Amino acid sequence: MMQLETKTSPKLIMGNPAPSLEVDTLTGSRWSLAEQNPAQYTMVVFYRGVHCPVCQQYIAELSQKLEAFQKLGVEAIAISGDTQAKAQQFHDQGNLQNLTIGYGLTPDDMRRWGLYLSKGHFDSEPAVFSEPALFLVKPDGQLYFADIGTHPFARPNLELLLQGLEYVIANNYPFRGTEWN
């Protein structure tokens, strides 16, 4: 059995400032988290890349529910470490409408956000890529919600997230996950 080197990674604490994040988008612009001004939250969805059919399905569902999130004041972006060409392929295959797609996420960016990284094991996979994650960031830059995955198979249920956000927004629900000691 192969022994893996023990490493640690940062744990992001809710209520603290989100790490910085800037990526190029398929619209040709540079997207910066610091420049976002949603009514309620910026939703940052990290996906593995074009090689992942589960990502394609999940991001397509997000694209279909985008209007419902926007009605709640939530603006979304989906980001991967893919190249521009691979991100465009991902966009076209999923027929993603109106969803901002960011690309070129670096391993340093991935680590700063506490994402799990994987080495490619198959020809279709990049050498290194992040596993999926979803974050909600308040307009003032504070982290509100994080779901960080280690595999492609389990992700937040978007319908349940919509229902939860309706309650959260209506009731000014407090930060959770703030205690780390």
Image: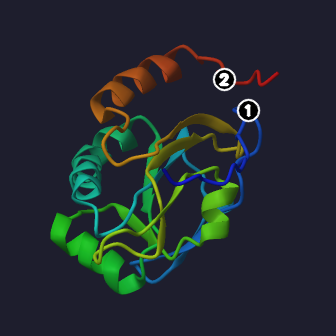
Q: Quickly name the residue at label 1.
A: 15
Q: Quickly name the residue at label 2.
A: 175
Whether residue 11 is visible to the viewer of this picture, yes or no, is yes
Q: Considering only vertical position in the picture, is 48 above or below 28? A: above
Which amino acid does the dot numbered 2 rest on? Phe
Of helix, strand and loop, which one carries label 1?
loop
Q: Quadrant of residue 14?
A: top right
- Specify which label sits upstream in the sequence, 1 or 2: 1
Give the CA distance from mark 1 to mark 2: 6 Å
Which amino acid does the dot numbered 1 rest on? Gly
Spot occupied by residue 66 in the image (x, y as percentages of width and height): 31, 47
**Which residue is pictured at 66% across the width and 39% down the height?**
143
Q: Considering only vertical position in the picture, is 57 above or below 171? A: below
Spot occupied by residue 176 in the image (x, y as percentages of width and height): 64, 21
Spot occupied by residue 21 in the image (x, y as percentages of width and height): 64, 63
Spot occupied by residue 127 in the image (x, y as percentages of width and height): 46, 76
Outermost residue to the top: 171
Query: Is 133 on the left-hand or right-hand side of 48?
Result: right
Of helix, strand and loop, which one carries label 2?
loop
Q: Considering only vertical position in the picture, is 97 above or below 162? A: below
**Which residue is pictured at 46% across the width and 43% down the height?**
149
Whether residue 95 is visible to the viewer of this picture, yes or no, is no
